[in-house]
Each structure stands twice: as structure tokens, then as C-alpha cells.
Amino acid sequence: MYSNGLAQVTPAGGATLCAKARRLLEIIRQKSVLRGKFKLASGAYSDYYLDLKPTTFDPEGAALIGEVLLARLRNIPEVTCIGGLELGSVPIIAAVCQRSWPEHPLPGFVVRKETKGHGTDKRIDGNFLPDATVALVEDVTTKGGSVMQAVNAVRARGANVDRVFTIVDRLEGAQETLRQDGIDLLPLFTTRDVLV
């Protein structure tokens, strides 16, 4: 049923975790699949749109995202913090950070699309660890251009990033784009799972 990786999430309590992943998929189908004509961030047009915010800001959806993603991250001990590009990644980062305490604390950070022009004027805000190995998260990937903004920003600050977790991959080229920069795209679901 899961095209990429949820079958790989089988630590202790694996059956329970798979049940949580199935429930998360149900919530995404109910709350986050819109039909119509939409222009995507990539500039392409689509007859459906995946708006993950109703899922990522849902109490149950956020809790499930935190649980499922943390299970994946526990298997990668070299990752010491997580982050992503504003806005879609923010509730995902918060859910994982909250769930990671206290057994596997992962600090989080956000990459702004542009600096604010006031205050600290940081492009990367939160608990970014320069020279660390970070994992980036995203709600939906299409071509990979948005997440590459975050990749470039954290690499410019000395961090190592070689994996991006996404809730849903639209299967429209993001995996290939990221692979060219030595990055593995690790979706929880793809459109094959979500669009039924």
C-alpha cells in the first residue's frame, strides 16, 4: 500500500506504527486532497491540489506525523537536528521536535524564504546547528525546487544534508532533482497512496 518506506518503519511496536501510518493516510485523504484546477509552485497546472496544512495542523494528524517521522529518524543516529523551508514544514518540525522529547531529542529550525529585514534578520531561525548532519522535512514535493532553497541555505552554513523527508511526493521529478545533489527523497506517501 505504501510506495516508499512506511513498510520500512518497523522498530519495536511496528504493527502499531503501521496502524498509525494508515490512520495518517486516512486523514490526508479526508482533509488535504482538493479537486479542481490549480497552479503549483513549480508553475505547472494540476487537476488536484494537496494542501497538507489541514492535516499538519490537525491535533491527531500532527501527533501521527510526529510519531511516524520520528520512527524513521531514530534509525539515522547521525542526524542531530531537523528543519525545512517555511511555511509547510513548520508544523511538521514542531510535531517531530515535541515527540522526540525526552528519549531522542531533536532540535528544529526553519529556513525563511527571505530575511525579515528587522530583528535578528536571520535566514535560518530556531535551533540550527552549523556543521551538523541535518534532515530536512517538507509537506509536499513536486519538482524539488522549494526544498532545494533550504538545502542550499543550510549547506551554506556548513551543515551536511543528504536526506529529505516529505509527507507526500507528487512523483513529478523531485526525487531526480534531489538525487543530482546527492540527496535521498524519503516520502511517507506518494500520490499513488493518496489519490484513490
Image (cartoon, rainbow, N blue to C red):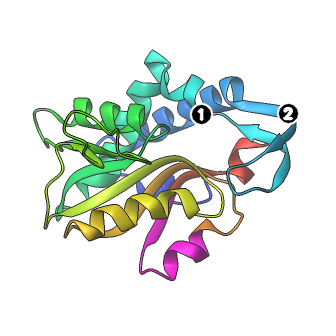
Residue, far top: 59
- Counting from the top left corner in percent of width and height, residue 189 is at 59, 50
Query: Crowding at label 1, few (<14), some or many (≥20) Cα neighbours within 10 Å?
Result: many
Q: Amino acid at mark 2?
A: Arg
SS assignment at label 2? strand
Quarter of the figure that contains the C terminus: top right
Question: Residue at left 50%, top 18%?
Answer: 58
Query: How many numbered marks does the figure carry?
Result: 2
* Nearest to N terminus: mark 1 or mark 2: 2
Which is more toward the observer, 55 or 111? 111
Asked whether, in this view, residue 107 is left or right of residue 42, the answer is left
- Counting from the top left corner in percent of width and height, residue 147 is at 48, 58
Question: Residue at left 20%, top 37%?
Answer: 100
Q: Alpha-carbon distance for marks 1 and 2?
A: 14 Å
Q: Which residues are magenta?
A: 175-186
Where 186 sits versus 119, above or below? below
Magenta region includes residue 165: no
Where 176 sits versus 67, above or below? below
Where 61 sits versus 105, above or below? above
Magenta region includes residue 183: yes
Which is more toward the observer, 68 or 186? 186
Can residue 196 be seen? no
Which is more toward the observer, 31 or 10? 31
Quarter of the figure with residue 97: top left
Q: Mark on residue 35?
A: 2
Q: Mark on residue 120?
A: none
Residue, far left: 102
Q: Amino acid at mark 1?
A: Leu
Residue beneath disc 1: 52
Question: Residue at left 38%, top 67%?
Answer: 152
Asked whether, in this view, residue 102 is left or right of residue 119, the answer is left
